[in-house]
Image (cartoon, rainbow, N blue to C red):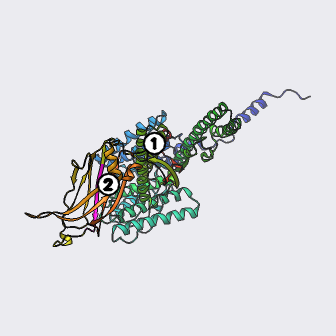
Amino acid sequence: FAGPVPMEDIAKMADECMRDVDDDDDDDNVEDDEDLLVGLTSVSAHCCFWGKQEVTVSTATPGSLQYTLESRVTVYKMALQNAKTAGETSKARRYDRGLKTLQSMLAAVKKGRPVNEAEIPPLVATGAPSADTKPPVPARPAPPVPSPPLPTQHKRFDTVIEALEKGQAVDLSNLPPSPAKTFCVLLSAPAAPAAPRDVLEALEQRRAKYVETSTQAKASGDDRKARMHDRIAKQYQSAIRTHKLGKPVNFDELPVPPGFPPIPGQKATGAEQGLIAALQTADQLASTDLSKVADEEENEEVQHLCQKKSIHRRKQYMKAALQAKHKNDMEQAKALLRTAKGLDPMIEAARSGRSVDISTVPSPPGDEDEDFVVVHHNDVAISEKAEKVYSQLTKILKEQYEKCLTHSKQFTHLGNVAETTKFEKMAESCKKSLELLKLSESKGLPPPPHHFEERSFCTVGIFPELSSTDMVVVIVKAMNLPAPSGIQTNDLDAYVKFDFPYPSSEQPQKHKTTVIKNTNSPEYNQSFTLSINRNHRGFRRVVTSKGLKLELLHKGGFLRSDKPIGTALVKLDKLESQSEIREIVEVIDGRKRTGGRVEVKVRLREPLSGQDVQKSTERWLSRGVKLILVQWPKTDQFDHFQREY
């Protein structure tokens, strides 16, 4: 067992433990190190050069709206400081207004309030600092750094701006990034093409450039960039079609490829505007996170719609099953109940955020024509024939709507409630399809899928605008009338008159048309209303045996009598079973045929005996066409379609 350790050894061991083995022996002379002082002076000059701004570390996710606003605030502060230093008061005021707008937007975003991204001030050039802000040169040269000094970088910007003013091609790949790292890396612009001879050639050159860029992006695996340039190429394709049709083109909405000359007849953009446009284009190419956020929001809206539609459809099937049970149709009730239960997994999947195909949702029971198909607006390509197809579909739907209203009114006057309700529903369906079609056309969407089908309708011949005591005679036209002797065919001035022997032959109802001059095929289209008594024996005798006799005459001149052309007889016996007859009768001279003809229509409110029920088959544009429900980026448009649904 050893003896106690002396106090001197204990003190020595304590000193050894407390001594820092990493201490540098030269710490006392750190203030005399010239190399360190030169480095600190360079860093201090760098900070003073950029306006002595506070260095803040952003906690926002790169690509988010908050990150974009914070970056823009930094750029505008930098540009404002440089503009004030250079004495450019107009730019300083403009940058100050933009800075205040950005700061208010940033505060709103941090509080969770919505911000309109379209109102965000664009990127601006920070501008070159004046000479008096140049950092002082120390007595000893600073150690070499990998990047050139900042004044040299701004001289590069001046060179690029001068080249843009002269309309020369510039290479943006060698430009340094912003110190605040808010500018994205610019792509090198290719050599400018030859100056276009006209507007069409300029548009073709730019479209070809965007198509080429899209192809290169696809080859490199950059699908987002490829889709963006595809959309711009389609935008130019639409502008080319508009220009070929002779319509005005809004060139301000068309992006300009870097280095391309201006379109003939359009003002060239200034150097600053050209640089800003290039920076904005590059910023759009790099903002991938924003597009992802928008896609996620659209997907959430689609899932919400799928969930809402599935729940609504399940309620419909449950209600239909209950109705079938009340009718003692147990098999139908079981089938409908099984279908309703089959929607539960789809509803749960939509609630949990999983992808659901809305096209697999079954149609409502007994109404298979009410289905919808969801497509994305960004993936729709507008066909060149879309305008023509829209016009044809609109015309057909309008005709069908008018037919349904006419038939509904006819059955209303007959007191047939079932047929009236049927045609009212068909008219409402046509009207709704027409409204959706117009809305789809106004948004630039392609025409919806459609098909025609043969439909049979039972209609009734009735003219509700006529009273039971009216009979209308319509003289439509005459064709190839013979000219009386001494009159040339081209000098024939013909008119038609008739005497209807009711209420008696001694008191007939007399009418005549106007005179159509200098033609042997006059068109009159004149209507004459006669007073009748449907149940009077004399009227029935005229209808069944006498008919309507027409006289055609040539109007004589001054002190000359009218010359007869011929006569025509219209039989009226078909009015017993029809509400309207249309006849083309021959014109005769005595018993001799003249070769001329007259077209006549005769109408009653309804046939003299019974109803004029007609069964017709028509080619019908069915609403069973699956109407397209388009998912719009804006909420109000999307809600409008939800209300339609």
In terms of depth relative to the viewer, which is nearer, 629 or 165? 629
Q: Main secondary structure of the magenta part?
A: strand
Residue contact between numbered discs 2 and 1, judged by CB atoms under 8 Å = no
Q: Quadrant of residue 549?
A: bottom left
Q: Left of 320 or right of it: where is 64? A: left
Q: Amino acid at mark 1?
A: Glu
- Residue 206: image location, x then y, percent: 42, 65
Residue 416, percent from left and from top:
46, 38
Q: Alpha-carbon distance for marks 2 and 1?
A: 43 Å
Q: Which residue is mark 2?
A: 547
- As for residue 479 lying within the magenta part, the answer is yes
Q: Position of residue 135 (x, y in %)?
A: 40, 50
Q: Which residue is mark 1?
A: 428
Q: Secondary structure at mark 1?
A: helix
Classify 10 Å Cα crowding around label 2: few (below 14), some (14-19), many (20 and above): some
Residue 641 visible somewhere in the drawing: yes
Q: Residue at x 43, y 55 (%)?
A: 390
Residue 442 visible in the picture: no
If the image is split into quadrants, where does the N terminus sit?
top right
Q: Residue furthest right?
A: 1
Q: Quadrant of residue 160?
A: bottom left
Q: Is residue 52 above or below residue 327?
A: below
The reply, left or right, for residue 485 in relation to residue 261 is: left
Q: Sequence order check: which comes first, mark 2 or mark 1?
A: 1
Q: Nearer the viewer, residue 290 or 25?
A: 290
The kind of secondary structure element at disc 2 is loop
Instruction: Work out whether residue 263 or residue 245 is closer to the camera in this orientation and state it.
Output: 245
Q: Residue 514 sits in which quadrant? A: bottom left
Q: Hey, what amino acid is under mark 2? A: Gly
Give the class, few, some or many, for how many residues have Cα within 10 Å of label 1's Cα (few <14, many ≥20).
some
Where does the magenta region start and end?
Answer: 472-481
